Amino acid sequence: MNTTTGTSKTASAANTTSLASSKTIKQIGETVWKNRTVKINAELFTLTYGSIVSQLCQDYQRDFKKVNDQLFSMGYNIGIRLIEDFLARTAIPRCDNFVTTSEVISKCAFKIFLNITPHVTNWSNTKNSFSLIFDENPLSDFVELPMDASKELWYSNILCGVLKGALEMVQLDCEVYFVSDVLRGNTQTELRVKLNKVLKDEMPAGED
Amino acid sequence: MIYSLWIFDRHCNCIFDKEYTVNQSTSIVNSKEQQSRGKLIYGMVHSLKAMSTKIAPGNTLRTLTTGKYRIHALFTASNLWIVIFSDLTHHELHERLDKIYELYLKYVVHNMLKPIDLRESENAKESDKITSPSFIKAVDQVLCL
Amino acid sequence: MSSSNPQRNPVVDTPEQIERRRIVEQFLLFQESLPKVNALSYQWLLNEMVPMSMAVENNLSQLDENSSVSSQSVEPTSDEINEEIHKLSLNKLEYVPSHKLIAQLCHASDEVKEKVTERLYKIGSGIGSKMTELLIFSNNPNLSFNSMDTLGMVRFICKEVWKLLYGKQIDNLKTNHRGVFYLFDYEFQPIQNFALDDDEEKLLSTVSPYIQVPLGVISGILTSLGVPEDDILVSFTYVDIPEDKKKPVGQFPKGLNFNIQVNQFQNNQD
């Protein structure tokens, strides 16, 4: 055995020194989706999520702000676990900067889990917040909101929670929220990710 | 042969350790006596890891060889560390480290009935240990091939 | 391509058989071409439903308390209101991890359990009825819904529905041919990784709410295929796994027996 080659998995990313090239990131996402992902019918996913949202609307008596919150915290609980699935499949190391992070989220994470690649845009001057624009969204395809919901409900708010939880586990304290949604009659679906701060890794006792 | 396996969480605490005897017929899991040793190992790996990145950015520690031991390590972006101690016959164990990570996924991450963060509260000094019998069994299958 | 088949088969297929095979192939190709997502994403969604349902229950009872308190006491100061808004605002939620919610549910009062159970069952039946549409419009040549009797519906659940939802079929189906069906799944996929070290009894009672979703699915499918909701009774029991289905490690210790009872059982006459 030789030390240089490694396994198919470790060869994908961990052996490359950095993730600077967005082409590499795209490749990792596509390879994992193509070769190492068990897939299911997207419509089943859509209708299952739909059943959850409609149950929540009923439970909270159409108080859509509470539904948003519930979807968010549901997502958060998923995100803090799902991040490990992601890391195990991609072996992606910590990103050097938030621009790389945005690429990894869009081309790798969304590709692998939902088979979509929302595009990254609207960077703030300080490069610490960006938007994801969704041309397609398997959570909400073919969904139509009733009138009363279309002003307050963020139908896909679970995504914000998932991102929030997952990013926190790699020490990125972020705010994640929807700015617009085609379901509400907006021209596009835009999700904003804003970096509050990079959390410090904990240190072993006595090494501060 | 493989001497021992150590897993550390993001709070720098050992959440699993397993040591094999010379003939690998018996092993000790999550032993109380090893607590201080776990801290030493963490400290050592921590320093080396920090140093290797200082030498060259993106340069990550993977194996470390001493006179009689070889240390193999896997670090995830979520700051989970998996460390295996072996003798010098094992040049690289990345495949097995990956497999241990897979087991961690299956028995810890995907087990919704148990916490993902094994540190009970923010003030707690130590984290709990992974005690799942299936995990322990499966680890043996990976390490004692 | 089917052109290579006649060589292996000495008997030449009838045109009907060839045509049928072509239709089946076409169907499979079409299924393959449909949009897909990662099965893991789906698994996370399914698994998070139970703790979420408990969290909803907690929130609803808290709302009840708050409203009854505020009606008695003096108006809260603006500071308090601000604090409240702050707490509820996006990204600042009070967070209870899933495993704690699941444990809370296990120790909850019967009343709470019942409410959470019902919520999960309703989500399940929502999924079930929409799945029927999905599968009807899929034009599967192996399915004909026109002349489907109750047994046909249950078979449809065992095969198509289970396959789509859980990636495997029901392992065994038993019926008394009088409206009672037992569906055995010895490796019910969503719960396979669930474990509580060695306490099996506690494990089984903790996992029980998870089974409400498939129970709801079953009833949703049957109602959407025309069986009146009041005539359907579904429940489940844990069963031992037969020797030949056992795995040495990493398997949930029990299998499931889904019990479907369709009352006023009549053969579909038309």
Image (tube, coloured by chain):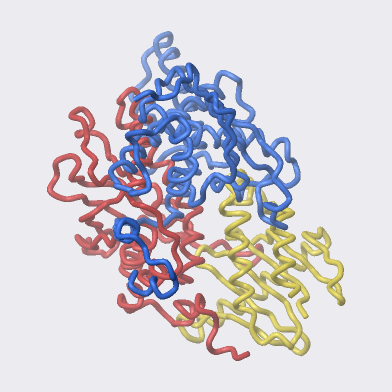
Q: State whether residue C86 appears in this view.
A: no
Q: Which residue is found at the position 31% from the left and 26% from the top?
A: A63
Q: Which residue is found at the position 74% from the left and 60% from the top?
A: B137
* Residue A166: quadrant of the picture: bottom left
Is A58 or A167 nearer to us in this picture?
Answer: A58
* Residue A68: quadrant of the picture: top left
Q: Residue furthest front?
A: C11
Residue C217, given in percent of the width and then of the height, sits at 45, 34
Q: Is residue C59 left or right of residue A144?
A: right
Residue A164, given in percent of the width and then of the height, sits at 40, 51
Q: Is residue C193 left or right of residue A26?
A: right
Q: Residue furthest top?
A: C72
Is B3 or C44 nearer to us in this picture?
Answer: C44
Residue B61, given in percent of the width and then of the height, sits at 57, 80
Is C183 or A95 nearer to us in this picture?
Answer: C183
Q: Which chain is blue?
A: C
Quadrant housing the N terminus of chain C: bottom left
Q: Which residue is found at the position 52% from the left and 39% from the top?
A: C96
Quadrant housing the C terminus of chain C: top left
* Residue A204: quadrant of the picture: bottom right
Q: Which chain is yellow?
A: B
Tag count in the figure? 0
Q: Which chain is red?
A: A
Q: Is residue B49 left or right of residue B125?
A: left
Q: Which residue is found at the position 46% from the left and 19% from the top?
A: C231
Residue A208, compared with residue A133, is above or below; it is below
